[in-house]
Image (cartoon, helix red, strand yellow):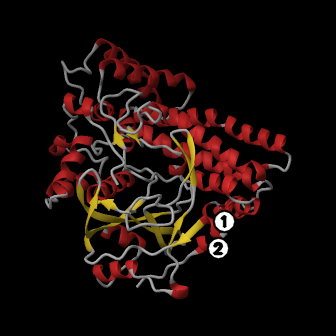
Amino acid sequence: MLYLEYSYLSLPATFYEKVKPSPFSKPELLLLNQALLDELHIQPQNPQAFLSFLLNQEEGDAFGSFAQAYAGHQFGHFTKLGDGRAIVIGEYVSATKQRYDLQLKGSGRTAYSRGGDGKATLKSVLREYLMSEAMHALKVQSSRSLAVVKTGEMVQREKPHEGAFLIRLMKSHIRVGTFEYARYFGSSQDLKALTKYTIQRLYPEIEQEENQALALLKKAMLVQIDVVVDWMRIGFIHGVMNTDNTAISGETFDYGPCAFMNVYHPQTVFSAIDTQGRYAFGNQPSIIKWNLAKFAEALLPLLHPEPETALKLAQGAIDEFEDNWYKKYYKMMLLKIGIEDVSPENYALVNELLAIMKELKLDYTNTFLALSQDLVETGSTMDSVDFKNWKVNWMSVMLNATGMVQAKKIMEANNPAFIPRNYLVEEALEKATVGDFTQFEQLLKVLQNPYQYQESLNQFTIPPAEEFETSYTTFCGT
């Protein structure tokens, strides 16, 4: 049916616990991502047989499914963790030699469940399916959702919910927290083994570096900057940027309390558990730098045998963050307004526009859509003196740099017309959990082509009512 490998099990046993999914009497395949199956060249003879294969791995040598051990700083506090509700069934190697973890999320207890049941609600699983596939279409590095399976059981949370689990793929679930686990709960040999494995699996090009640990730190910094820059580009708020949710591969994953910003404000936060706004939209750059600093701390013993020298190497790498961040951030923001010239003198155009957007309480996505499609209406909130003055300056720079035709192409490639508006997501999920998938499927279809603006789909660009925006809260929800 499908050949799976288990390279992760070559690591010391401290990094994992072998476990099988919980037995479910009537698992039902609810959603299957056929496009992703085609992309991976996976062609099951029939979907139900494929599901049975994943849930019923044989005992003995062929039994290799496992849960990963890791630690993490959660809202700044360090704790020992692990896959409490996720099981890696195995690793699939594609025709292009790309290795993926094939993971079941919500399929039962593991050694790391810490008193939890290891299961998930249907609503939370549908949410991750929708969000991860939307993020992929938005050109953001992300986990992918392969299928949603109803378990036929009820899951008790604040009330009984229909149970389900997600089948998802990632290039790797190794995270900053995995290295923290190795450093603080493992041996020096464990840390060396993890570092060697991670480099071989994700970044073999740095195997020839004299200081591989330092090269890994710098590589991880660059891919993390890239993914968070993309979050800022589309107005995405992860909501729970703990070090255990920071993948070394640079993939976005775990879509529990995430949301998309509507009215622009750097301190926008929706997560109910982020009571201090630690992971607010505008804080995401500083938080990813903080997480990378924790990665550097975990790698210290491998950076250099002399602690003082190791610390200097780590600090030197982290000190490169600011310059890398601002170059990539402003390059992205200038592309959003159609300018390829990343000269620092153009940064003011970005800063001034964001200040106007904040002052006028403009919708983040729709402001850039209006610029790219020339949709600024007379008498609208955008039609203000400050915005008009900014637009004159912008037009002057843009016309001299690229011209209107090229600028429009650049803006359309970098500014989505359609995002998973929070209220549309909630409406679709509420209906889907009671069996009506009409709105879910319609929204998913629109989000699969987020950069192709169509006037006939304008209902998907409408921001929420103010009362929804001010009261909306997200939860982990699993």
Residue 319, picture quadrant:
top right
Q: Is residue 202 visible?
A: yes
Task: Assign a secondary structure to mark 2.
Answer: helix
Relative horizontal placement of residue 315, taking residue 241 as reference (left or right): right
The residue sitting at the front extreme is 115
- The local crowd at label 2, few if under 14, some if 14 to 19, many if 20 or more residues have their Cα within 10 Å, is few
Q: Is residue 31 left or right of residue 69?
A: left
Amino acid, disc 1: Tyr
What is the x, y in percent for residue 343?
56, 28
Q: Are marks 2 and 1 in contact (CB under 8 Å)?
A: yes
Vertical side of 242 occupied by 275: above or below? above
Give the x, y percent position of residue 471.
25, 32
Disc on the earlier residue, 2 or 1 = 2
> Which disc is residue 10 wearing?
2
Residue at horizontal 57 percent and vertical 59 percent from the top? 174
Q: Is residue 402 visible?
A: no
As displayed, is residue 286 above or below residue 24?
above
Residue 344 in the image, given as x and y percentages of width and height: 56, 25
Residue at 44% across, 37% down: 232
Say what secondary structure mark 1 lies in.
Answer: helix
Check the picture and name the quadrant holding the N terminus: bottom left
- The part of the image, by quadrant, that contains residue 13 is bottom right
Identify residue type, mark 2: Ser
Pinpoint residue 282: horizontal percent, then vertical percent. 45, 31
